[in-house]
Image (tube, helix red, strand yellow):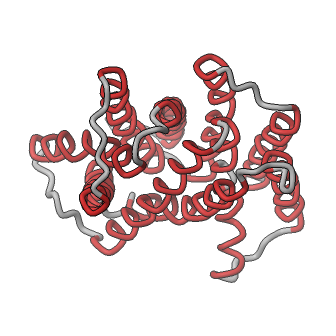
């Protein structure tokens, strides 16, 4: 029996909540592994996808190559740039600050659509964007922090995340979620492995770090499958709202695992970004 539109939306929301939990756990793992080479972390992040997803595709008799190959490749490349920028910011910054900056991506979607595609941006959306920008300024605190370079890289990752998520939403019309995840994993995995060999700085992890690398790959796979499924089951403007849960999760996990207590500026800024995300969602459904 085919699910109704409301049932599909509810499943999509559940998938996005699961994705948010997994993405936060992934960020915690990367933050713990920050002494390892960045490309080594990224390779292990992709390893589970490269080993497991092809078997899942074969079992379901789904073609590895997909249908919309240009968009599949574009999504993989966007995802690769996003991962490098995001993981770098996580290793170099406070966990909550890095996760919060990444959640600016929905606002960059709106801004880029207005600039590049000529889509109309309402006055309400402009006000919401300004509110989100104010929140970002409070988190970034330009002029009051020495790690401004990772912040810039994190903001670049947020911009590129917008492109990656739009590509995933477009692929719902042509390709199975596992095909999308498979392209993503292999493009990132092969590139990171090649760079790691070129750099020649592979580090043999201790037992705990190796366990966390495996955990990183597992939750990363779960996050990608859940995210892709969410966008295929429900509209982007509905499910994207639940990505902001990552900010809340990261605050608690940052305190629990790393004793990183966000300052009042970061908490207030994160709150403004969450509120802006909710207001943006309300404007879209009116």
Front-lying residue, 97 or 4? 97
Query: Can you tell which quarter of the image residue 53 is in?
Result: top left
Taking the spot 70% from the left edge, 66% from the top edge, the residue there is 110
Rendering coords of residue 111 (x, y %): 72, 70
Taking the spot 62% from the left edge, 55% from the top edge, the residue there is 154
Taking the spot 61% from the left edge, 23% from the top edge, the residue there is 258
Rendering coords of residue 144 (x, y %): 86, 49
Front-lying residue, 104 or 178? 104
Can residue 61 be seen here? yes
Quarter of the picture containing the N terminus is: top left
Rendering coords of residue 23 (x, y %): 50, 37
Left/right placement of residue 103 relative to residue 122 reads: left
Taking the spot 26% from the left edge, 52% from the top edge, the residue there is 182
Can residue 176 be seen here? no
As displayed, is residue 261 above or below residue 58? above
Left/right placement of residue 12 relative to residue 189 reads: right
Front-lying residue, 40 or 206? 206
């Amino acid at each position: 029996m085919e699910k109704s539109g409301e049932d599909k939306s509810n499943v999509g929301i559940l998938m996005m909540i699961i994705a948010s939990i997994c993405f936060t756990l992934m960020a915690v793992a990367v933050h713990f592994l920050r002494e390892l080479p960045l490309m080594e972390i990224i390779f292990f992040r992709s390893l589970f996808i490269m080993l497991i997803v092809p078997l899942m595709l074969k079992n379901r008799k789904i073609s590895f190559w997909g249908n919309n190959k240009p968009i599949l490749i574009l999504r993989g490349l966007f995802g690769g740039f996003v991962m490098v920028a995001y993981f770098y910011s996580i290793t170099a910054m406070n966990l909550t600050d890095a996760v919060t900056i990444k959640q600016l991506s929905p606002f960059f979607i709106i801004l880029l659509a207005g600039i590049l595609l000529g889509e109309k941006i309402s006055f309400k959306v402009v006000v919401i964007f300004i509110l989100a920008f104010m929140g970002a300024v409070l988190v970034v605190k330009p002029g009051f922090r020495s790690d401004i370079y990772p912040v810039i890289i994190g903001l670049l990752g947020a911009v590129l995340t917008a492109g990656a998520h739009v590509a995933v939403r477009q692929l719902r019309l042509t390709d199975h979620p596992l095909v999308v995840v498979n392209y993503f994993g292999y493009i990132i995995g092969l590139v990171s492995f090649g760079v790691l060999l070129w750099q020649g700085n592979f580090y043999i992890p201790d037992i705990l770090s190796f366990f966390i690398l495996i955990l990183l790959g597992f939750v990363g796979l779960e996050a990608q499958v859940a995210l892709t499924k969410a966008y295929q089951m429900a509209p982007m403007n509905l499910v994207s709202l639940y990505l902001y849960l990552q900010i809340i999760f990261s605050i608690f996990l940052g305190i629990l695992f790393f004793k990183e207590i966000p300052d009042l500026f970061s908490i207030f800024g994160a709150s403004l970004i969450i509120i802006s995300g909710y207001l943006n969602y309300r404007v879209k459904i009116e």
